[in-house]
Image (spheres, rainbow, N blue to C red):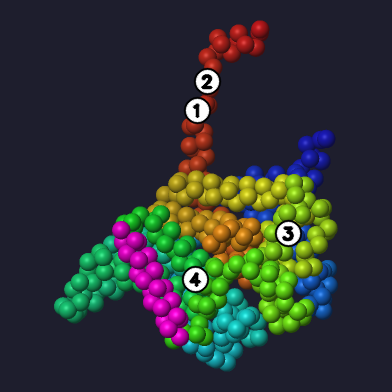
Amino acid sequence: MSEEKKNTSFLGHLANILDSFTGDKVIFLIALFLMLISVVSVFSSTPRLANDTGSDRVTIMVNQLKVVALGFVLIFSLYYFGKREWYRKLSMLGYLASFGVLAILVLNLNLGVLRAGEINGARRILIVAGKQIHIYEFVKLFMIMYLGWALDTFKNHGFKWAPRLASLFPRLAFLEKDLWQKILYIYFPILSVTLMVMMGSNSSALFIGAIMVLMVLVGGIDFRDVGYVVAVGILGIGVMFGAYKAGWLKDSRIGTAIGRITQDDDATMQQLITSKRESLEWRQARGKLDQPVGALLAIKEGGVFGKGIGNSTQKYQVPVIFGDYMFSFIVEETGILGALVLIILYFSLLARGTMVAKECDSYYDKVIVTGLIILVTGQAFMHMAVNVHLPMVPQTGQTLPLVSHGTNSFLVFSLVFGILLSISKDARENMARREAEAKPILEHGEDEWTQNTTA
């Protein structure tokens, strides 16, 4: 093949794009592969969704392609035009933005074009001009960006309002101490956001809280301080659990969380078998088993090589297999080999993100990259843990990043990858220099190499 033909082929164009790409190529390729997997998987996994919504799979796939295209636009817009200074200024507003949108949910406010909405009896969405926004997806990103700013500002002694209040009011002189600044700018935002999210979703609160705690630990905050925050959180959960048992919080989500953690599938199966078909008890038992048991059955039937693309049977049984149980669906159709591809992609992202964070010159960049990588890979492995029914893991929904069906989640993770690629431009030069300076594992002298080649 001539050089000219090679450069005009699809692979040639892709190679040319990668050559001119100044961000991290590995992260970019991981995002590309995940998006391609998403298009195929969503098309194959949505016959039940098409039937429930009166649509068809082609229409759903076309809509998914539009979401993927918009995701690409977001990624490349942030990659080409995003600047660290912009991210840092916007990060300052992350907690205020999170607190504001969560307050609308908690207080069940109706602000005209913006109002709180419910899913499955819990206020989890904002309705903006008739469109549903799954706000917890955005809160994850907002709080990671905010904590990146807060940790960087604390490290550089850059907080302004607490010292200013301390100078104006002598009784508030304690605000000048590092501990109180950490409480005010870091620990209180973590606890307040986690509590507000818990009002609508215990599992989301657990996940978001864990991600934030991991981020501040990696960011260098004293382990003892974080331990105190976790202890306060556990104490708060204990108080809420006691109030629930006392009957004061009967209408809260605490009972749902307890039920999901302690759910006994064997007992539920026995209830299904012994109950009269289509009775209330039978329907309740089947509702509890449809998703977890169907997901496990999909994994078991997938085996090593899978049933083949389009041959899944559980996609007709599991209600949200295209979202919360996408990993099970992929295993059913592509087997353990398909599962390994996904696991390798997310582990590669974790490894590459760690390298990028290490090579960043700015502490803010290091913390932001670390937090975003923890978010993507943490949610991916949480999704897989739910799908395989790992003990003590609440059976509740977390989408598979950049793969599962879901506009809000997909676009948020597109923003995540766009920010990662934007920051990686600054780290790539350092990485290239280190790779060029790296020595081979085994070195051969000239005489030894000559002897081996002439033998």
Residue annotated with mark 3: 297
Q: Nearer the viewer, mark 1 or mark 4?
A: 4
Task: Kindly check if marks 2 and 1 are in contact, taking CB atoms under 8 A apart as contact.
Answer: yes
Asked if 19 appears above or below 77 in the picture, the reply is above
Label 1 or label 3, whichever comes before in sequence order:
3
Residue annotated with mark 1: 439
Circle 3 SS class? helix
Residue 20 position, x and y percent, is: 63, 47
Which quadrant of the figure has residue 272? Answer: bottom right
Q: How many marks?
A: 4
Residue 292 position, x and y percent, is: 67, 65
Label 1 or label 4, whichever comes before in sequence order:
4
Residue drawn at point x = 47 percent, y = 62 percent = 211
Q: Is residue 418 magenta?
A: no
* Image-based side of 105 in relation to 403, left or right: left
Q: Nearer the viewer, mark 2 or mark 3?
A: 3
Residue annotated with mark 2: 443
